[in-house]
Image (cartoon, rainbow, N blue to C red):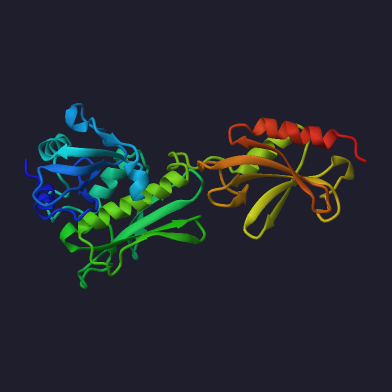
Amino acid sequence: MRTERLDRLITEGTHHTFRPVLLHDGRVLSVCIDPGSDTATTVCLWPGLDAPDGKAWENEDHLEAFLTGDDTDGRDFMNVPVQDLRSLIEQHGGEAPATDTEDAAAFPTAHLRAAGVRYLEDGGHAGQYLRVPLADGTAITFAGTTDRPDRNPDVSIHHPVREHRSWSAQWSDGATVLADVYASHDTARPYVEDTAALLHAVCKRVRQSGGSAPEGGAGPTAEELARQALAEWGLTAHLDPDSGHTWLVIGHPDTGRVPDMDSEPHILLSIYNEDDDEWSVDRPPARPGDHWQVVTDDGAGAEETLTIRPVNQLAPCITTIAEWITQPRT
């Protein structure tokens, strides 16, 4: 079985950088190798690609990713003989794309399937794209462009590899674009490098959002979960948005109204994510850094954190709120 890209990387070397190799079944590995060497200095196996048994794969380096800033979540192996690397590629059906006439979307979709990421194909007159619905209620969309000016539309996922020009991906809450995930316009990257970089960026965002959403869609929002749990205690809450953050505000029920947050004691309940520096109840609590936080405010600006809990421990938070609510007021 031919391994043209690997052979070229061996001949030219990778100049102390990692260069990707796409495999036929959607897996990816990256190689760092000196010109003409029969041993790769480092091989990074991206998530989903397991190391074979054997002596060649015994020298795993757990510090390499930290030292190099690699954030693929892959596994690094040192001093891997080229013959063993070539054998691994052959075990996964060889390199991809097989030919330059192959559909440009064939490898990205194969990689997403291999990674367990659910995606949907969508589009219209403006072009075709792939959408990845995420567990936190947001989504990623991505599409490519071609270098053929006569192709209309040029925004496409179904074009031959030989006509590929660039990829772009955006992360959105469904109403607005929140951030560019990846864009390679005017970079003139070869298809393999461009596609590997796209998938690295997309899968990183997928992990940050807690994975892709199941077929039934993202789960209930933190607000929906909290209101249901509060209702079981006969408690109600007021949604308070402020500067892009959202909280549920709970006051003493004997007032019969929403508490005056500038003068009356109240409790704030929200999902806090330190990684994003975000307080929110308007999305599902699905991100890895999410946790419930209950904070009291005496109405004069003095706050106290009563409890911080993982997202699967809402019940103790509600119990804490109920205990505070039932305390005698002074």
Q: In this image, 162 relative to 288: left or right?
A: left
Quadrant (top left, top right, bottom left, bottom right) of the N terminus: top left
| Residue most extreme to the right | 330
Q: How many marks?
A: 0
- Seen at 36% across and 54% down, the residue is 122
- Seen at 69% across and 30% down, the residue is 316
- Seen at 13% across and 47% down, the residue is 6
**Vertical placement of 179 versus 1: above or below?**
below
Q: In this image, 310 relative to 20: left or right?
A: right
**Vertical placement of 329 versus 32: above or below?**
above
- Seen at 26% across and 54% down, the residue is 195
Please provide percent x and percent y for residue 254: 89, 41
Please provide percent x and percent y for residue 307: 69, 37
Q: In this image, 255 relative to 51: left or right?
A: right
Please provide percent x and percent y for residue 150: 20, 72
Residue 166 in which image quadrant: bottom left
Please provide percent x and percent y for residue 106: 23, 49
Q: Is residue 121 visible?
A: no
| Residue most extreme to the left | 1
| 299 and 82: which is toward the camera | 82
| 184 and 43: which is toward the camera | 43
| Residue most extreme to the bottom | 149
Quadrant (top left, top right, bottom left, bottom right) of the C terminus: top right
| 198 and 154: which is toward the camera | 198
Q: Is residue 127 visible?
A: yes
